Image (cartoon, rainbow, N blue to C red):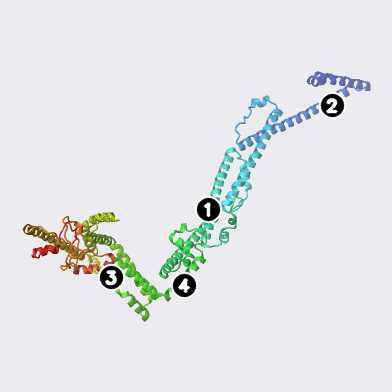
Amino acid sequence: MQVLGSPLRSSWDPKMNTCCGSLLTELQHVWDEIGESEVDKDRMLMELERECLDVYRRKVDEASNAKARLHQSVVAKEAELATLMAALGELGFHSPSQAEKRSTSLKKQLASILPRVEGLRIKKEERMKQFADVRAQIEKISGEISGYSQTNDVNNLITEEHDLSLRKLNEYQTRLHSLQKEKSDRLQKVLEYVNEVHCLCGVLGLDFGKTISEVHPSLQQVAPEHSANISNNTLECLEQTIQKLKSERRTRMQKLKEIGVSLFELWNLMDSPEEQRRRFKSITFVLKSSESEVKESGALSQEIIEQATAEVERLIELKASRMKELVLKKRLELEEICRKLHIIPDMSTTPEKSIALIDSGLVDPSELLANIEAQISKAKDEAINRKEIMEKIDRWLAACEEERWLEDYNLDENRYSAGRGAHLSLKRAERARVTVNKIPAMVDNLMSKARAWENERKMPFLYDEVRLVSLLEDYKITRQQKEEEKKRFRDQKKLQDLLLTEKELIYGSKPSPKRSNSFRNTNGYRANGDGSMPTTPRRYSAGSATPGSVTPRSRSGRQNGHFKEMRRLSTAPLNFVSINKEDTMSYASVCGSELGSPPRD
C-alpha cells in the first residue's frame, strides 16, 4: 500500500497529499471495520491507482488535444495574418522566432495575433469596397466609351482579392482618372458636334431634333444632368452627319450663288426697284461671304432657294418681253464706254440694225444681247489697257485748256485792274504758265508711251479713228510753225519800231493816233474787244503766244472729232496776245506810217 501510494502522493502538492492521505486512512478504517483481508485491500488499492492513472491519462490527452488545437489556431491566424498582409501590401509584420515562441504560451500568441487579424480583415473589407467602387466606375465609363454595357466578372473579383495593395488601387484610380478625362473630352466633343449640327440645321432650315435623333436619341438634351452617348459609334455618326450637312451647305451655297449672280444681273438689266431687291437681301450677304461666315438662320433654306429661283424665272420672262429695250440699253452702254475711250464701237450692233434684226426674227434677242455684252466686256478690257495713255491725254488736253484760258486772259486789257477776284486770276495765270511750259514734255512722254503701247500690241493706238502718234506729230509741227511765226512777228515789230523812230527823227514826234474800232482783221488775226489788232508786248510771256488754232478744244469738242480738224486748222493764221496801249503801237498805224499816209489827229 505504501509503495503504490507513495508515487501518487509525491506528485501532489502538500494540501492534496493531506486530503488524499486522510481519505486513505479513513478508507482503511472502514475496511478494518468491515474486516477486509489484506489481499482485498491491496486489490482495491490497485484498482484505485489504475483508475487514477486513467483519469490522469484522459486529462493529459485532453490537454494535448487542446494544445494541438490551440497551436493549429495560432498557425492558422499567423497564416491568415500573412495572407492579409500580403494582399494589403503591408510590410510591417515581424514573425516571432522559435525561441520567442517557446518562451510564450500559445494562448498569449493567439491573443496577440487576433486583434491584428481582425484589424486587417476590416481593412481588407474597406479596401475591397474601394476596389469595387473604382472598378464599377471604370467599367461604367468603359461601357459608355465602347457603347456596350459590361458586368462584373466574378473570376476577376476573386483574383483581385489576392492583390488589394495601395499600388494596385492607385493603378485603378489612375486608369479611372484617365477614363474620366477621356469621357470629359468626348462629352465636350459631342457638345461641339451637336452645336455644329444645330448651327448647320439652322442655316439649312432643317429640323434639328429629327436630325440629331437619327444619330442617337440621348443627344436631344445634351446637358450635365443628362447622360449623352459618347461612344465611338456616336462620334463617327456625328462626324458623318456634319460632313453631310456641310456638303449640303456647300451645294446649296453654290446653287444660291449661281442664282444670285443671275438675279443681280437681271436686276441691273431690268432696273428693278429697291423694294424687290430688299426681299432677297440675305442672298447679297451669301454672295459676299464664305461658307464659314454664313450663320444666319434659314440663309440657305430650301425655301429661300425656291423663292430666288422663282424670282429669276419671273425676271427672265419679263426680260423676254423687254428684250428690245434691253438691247438698246446695252448698246448705249457700249457706246458710252467707247466714247470715253475715243474708239469706234462695233457697227454690227447699232440701234438701227439691232431693232431691224429683232423685228425680222432672224436673230435671237438673247444672242444679240449676249453679243453686245461680250463687246462691252471687250471694251472694258480695252479701257484697262488704254488707261495710262488716256490719263496722259486728259492731262495734256487739260494743259491745252489752260493754255487757251491764258490766251484769253492775256487778251483782257483789264486783267491788271484792282477789281474783285483779280488776284485769283493772277494766281491762276501763274499756275497756267507753269502748266503750259510742261506741254512739250507732256507731248514727248505721250508719244513715247503710245509707241511703246503699239510695239507691245503690234497695232496702232487710235484716237477717234486717227493714230495718236500722227496727231501728236502734227501738233508738234503746228506748234513749231507757230513759234516761227511768232519769231517773224517779233522781227517785223522790231523793224517797224526802227522805221517809226527814223520817221520821228525826220518829221518830229507826233501823238499816237487813236485806234479805230472798225479795224478789220484782214490777216486772220484775232481782234481785241475794242476791234483793234492785238500787238506784241515788249515783255513777252511764254504762255501768252499760244495760237488758238493749235490749242486742243474742250473735252466736249474732242468728242465731236477735234483731232480730225487739227490738220485742217494747223495752217490757219496765228493769233497773238495784246498788251497795254502804253507799251505798244497799233499795227495799222505802223503800216500806215510806213506807206507814207499822214497820221490822223
Q: Which of pointers 2 and 4 lies earlier in the amino acid sequence?
A: 2
Viewer-side label of 1, 3: 3
As drawn, the label of residue 314 is 4
Separation of residues labelled 2 and 4 (CA atoms): 139 Å
Give the image location of residue 552, x and y in percent. Answer: 23, 64
Question: Pointer 2: residues within 10 angstroms few (<14), some, or many (20+)?
Answer: few
Q: Which of pointers 1 and 2 lies earlier in the amino acid sequence?
A: 2
- Amino acid type of the residue tagged 3 in the rendering: Ile
Q: Which of pointers 1 and 4 lies earlier in the amino acid sequence?
A: 1
Look at 70% across and 30% down and name the residue there: 111
Would residue 221 be visible to someone looking at this image? yes
Q: Which residue is mark 1?
A: 192
Q: Which of pointers 1 and 3 lies earlier in the amino acid sequence?
A: 1
Viewer-side label of 2, 4: 4
Separation of residues labelled 4 and 3 (CA atoms): 36 Å
Q: Which residue is mark 3?
A: 344
Separation of residues labelled 1 and 2 (CA atoms): 102 Å
Look at 61% across and 38% down and name the residue there: 87
Question: Pointer 1: residues within 10 angstroms few (<14), some, or many (20+)?
Answer: few
The quarter in which the N terminus is drawn is top right
Q: Residue furthest bottom?
A: 360
The quarter in which the C terminus is drawn is bottom left
Look at 28% across and 65% down and name the residue there: 555
Q: Is residue 550 above or below residue 229?
A: below
Relative depth, front residue between 242 and 528: 528
Separation of residues labelled 1 and 3 (CA atoms): 62 Å
- Amino acid type of the residue tagged 4 in the rendering: Arg
Q: Which of pointers 4 and 3 lies earlier in the amino acid sequence?
A: 4
Q: Which of pointers 3 and 2 lies earlier in the amino acid sequence?
A: 2
Relative to residue 418, is residue 109 drawn left or right? Answer: right
As drawn, the label of residue 47 is 2
Secondary element at tag 4: helix
